Image (tube, rainbow, N blue to C red):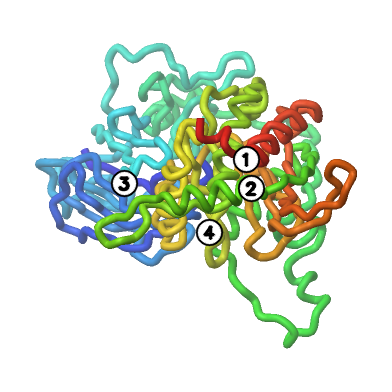
Amino acid sequence: MPINVLMPALSPTMEKGNLAKWLKKEGDAIKSGDVLAEIETDKATMEVEAIDEGVLAKILVPEGTADVPVNGLIAIIAAEGEDPSSVQAGGAPKAASNGEVKAEKAEPSAASQNTTPGGGHMSYERVNAAPEGAQPTGAPQAAGQAGSGGRVFASPLARRIAKQEGVELGAVQGSGPHGRIIARDVQAAKASGTTKAPAPQAGAEAPKAAAPAPKAAPAGGAPAGLTTDQVKGFFAKDAYEEVPLDGMRKTIAKRLTEAMQVAPHFYLTVDCELDALMKLRETLNGSAGKDKDGKPAFKLSVNDFVIKAMGLALTRVPAANAVWAEDRILRFKNAEVGVAVAIDGGLFTPVIRRANEKTLSTISNEMKDFAARARAKKLKPEEYQGGVTSVSNLGMFGIKHFTAVINPPQSSILAVGAGEKRVVVKDGAPAVVQVMTCTLSCDHRVLDGALGAELVSAFKGLIENPMGMLV
């Protein structure tokens, strides 16, 4: 049986991918675990491994092809014992001398298809060949048959033949997996002449076609109702340069537009004094051991303290350590804190797992590794997916205050501004302190105002009394 190789879904948000490079060529023997190709997702370039054995018979999508749909057919592997030259595009063997042989796609089984996001394996469909006119034995009652208003389960090829020949699928007995209607079932029904779709009665008025819905603007693109050409019409042609959207920018535009439309945001702002934290940071960095090259074992940043403080705050306010899941709320036992890392053309948000349990030095070293690999686009999907909240720090750019958009499925995000010296009143007298403004964006489906305020208060307490992060 030939094996169809499909474009894998390497992340839950991936809809299309770019086939960057084939690492095997037609005629090469394939073993389980061999790296077949490099796929560019919306976030990274990943090597994809084979999960079956055979010979790479045909490459249907050449390397360098962009926007290949997930589950699109990209290659065919000839199974052991098959002649690779007899395999046609689409997985159908060429006609044999003793009669034509047609192929019908079977439902992928758990053993033949890997659909786990980020699994790093190609997806497969095995193609079962059956002689024309072969009759199945012991076929179950057709799950493909529609009951009263029920759904008809049929393969795409069967549906196309039925439409062309005027065959009513609801009356066809399915012989495919789980009673699914396949091509030979439709052809047998056509031969019997008993399942023609009823012709419309003479004089009957045809139903009016529904008016087409207005075309929605792409996420992050032109305003609703305006096409790209209309937007360009507002400006002189020599006033701008057109920059094509890459996969990352398309994903950012789509997901964050959806976040603002779906998640009801509200914002809570607090000023945190940093004097105690800065003193502790200086002490800890000064006590760091040296490696064999004489470099410090760690160098803590203010952001490392912010990540740790958010992790501890979430576990101290467990009702806030949760995400929205449509018909329920998922509440977590440990804190997972994403951290926005800016790169050319977009950003990654790698997630510090169990941030509440990790030491400051561990968080610091983990973030340095994440940041380096993010800028090289070498992060694995499981390293930047999930999380309950995120930290977005623009303080290094001198930004005093801003609000951030929640990154679904997370329920909050903390926008961190620059630390600066301010005059405040302490004990009835003016005093100069270093202050950092932070704003928490909250998803009102998960956090109400009082719960969000409790989380921000716990965070502020940890930042202003940082010794609590060490015990």
Determine contact: label 1, label 3, CB under 8 Å. no
Q: Which residue is tagged 2? A: 255
Q: Which residue is mark 1?
A: 408
Q: Earlier in the sequence, mark 2 or mark 3?
A: 3
Q: Please, which residue is most extreme toward the right here?
A: 428
Closer to the camera, 410 or 219? 410
Mark 4 element type: helix
In this view, which residue lies farthest toward the left? 81
Indicate the amino acid at tag 1: Pro
Q: Is residue 301 visible?
A: yes
Identify the amino acid type marked 2: Arg
Kind of element beneath mark 1: loop
Q: Earlier in the sequence, mark 1 or mark 3?
A: 3
Q: For mark 3, what is the residue?
A: 5
First along the sequence among labels 3 and 4: 3
The residue nearer to you, when weighing 324 against 424, is 424
In the displayed structure image, the side of residue 282 where residue 132 appears, left or right = left
**Residue 247 badge:** 4
> Real-space Cα distance between discs 1 and 3?
31 Å
Residue 217, quarter of picture: bottom right
Q: Point out residue 466 in the picture as x, y percentages from the top left corner.
A: 60, 39
In this picture, residue 414 sits left or right of residue 1:
right
Could you tell me the amino acid type at mark 4? Gly
Percent of width and height locating residue 136: 29, 20
Label 2 SS: helix
Of label 2 and label 4, which has the lower sequence position?
4
**Residue pictured at 33% horizontal, 28% vertical:** 109
